Amino acid sequence: MTPVRVQVRRVRPHPEPLPLPRYQSGQAAGLDLCADIDGEWTLAPQARRAVPTGLAIALPEGFEGQVRPRSGLALRHGITCINAPGTIDADYRGEIQVLLVNLSGEPFTLRRGERIAQLVIAPVVRAELEEVDTLPTTRRGDGGFGSTGR
C-alpha cells in the first residue's frame, strides 16, 4: 500500500500540543482525531456541538477526508457524529471540526486530547451526469426502502 502524503498544520499554539492523528493498529483505516479543547466540555443529552481538533490539512487533488464516529464512544456513551460521514474536500484549508451529538440520556464530559472521531482518507471519483429519458432496467427496478427484505 502506497501512503498518500497529507500536509498538517496546527491552527493555534498550545503549551502542550496534542499528538498528530495516528492509526491505532497496523490495519486501521482511520486516523484518530482528538478534541483540542481547554479543560472539559459537557455535552447534554440530545445536544450537539462542533468540537475543534486544532488541525487543518491539505489533501492531494483526487482525495477526500471522511470524518466518522468512533464505535466505542457510540456504544458506551451514545456519542456519535451528527453528519457521518462528514466530508473534507481537497480544497478546504480550515480547521477540522467534529460535529458530535449525545444520543444518550446522560450528560457526557469531553476532555482535552480525547479521541472523538476517525479520519479516513479516500480517493474520489468525479461523475459526469448524462440526462436520459429512460434508465436500463434491473430486477430490483424502483423498489426502495425494505424492498429486498430483512
Image: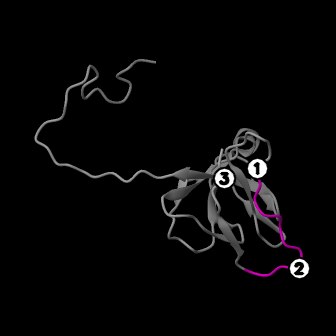
Observer-side mark, 3 or 1, equals 3
Left or right: 23 in relation to 82? right
Q: Amino acid at mark 1?
A: Tyr
How does the figure colour the protein chain or chains? one colour
- Mark 3 and mark 1 lie on one chain; the one further toward the N terminus is 3
| Secondary element at image label 1 | loop
Q: Which residue is mark 3?
A: 3
Is residue 14 magenta-colored? Answer: yes
Name the residue: 51% across, 65% down. Answer: 90
Q: Amino acid at mark 2?
A: Pro
Residue 141 on image: x %, y %: 24, 25
| Secondary element at image label 3 | loop
Name the residue: 82% across, 62% down. Answer: 113
| Residue furthest out toward the left | 133
Mark 3 and mark 2: Cα distance apart in space: 30 Å
Mark 2 and mark 1: Cα distance apart in space: 24 Å
Residue 59 on image: x %, y %: 57, 64
Residue 60 on image: x %, y %: 55, 64
Over which residues does the magenta segment extend?
Answer: 12-22
State the image quarter where residue 119 is shown. Answer: bottom right
Q: Which mark is on residue 72?
A: none
Is residue 18 magenta-colored? Answer: yes
Q: Which residue is mark 2?
A: 15
Residue 83 on image: x %, y %: 53, 53
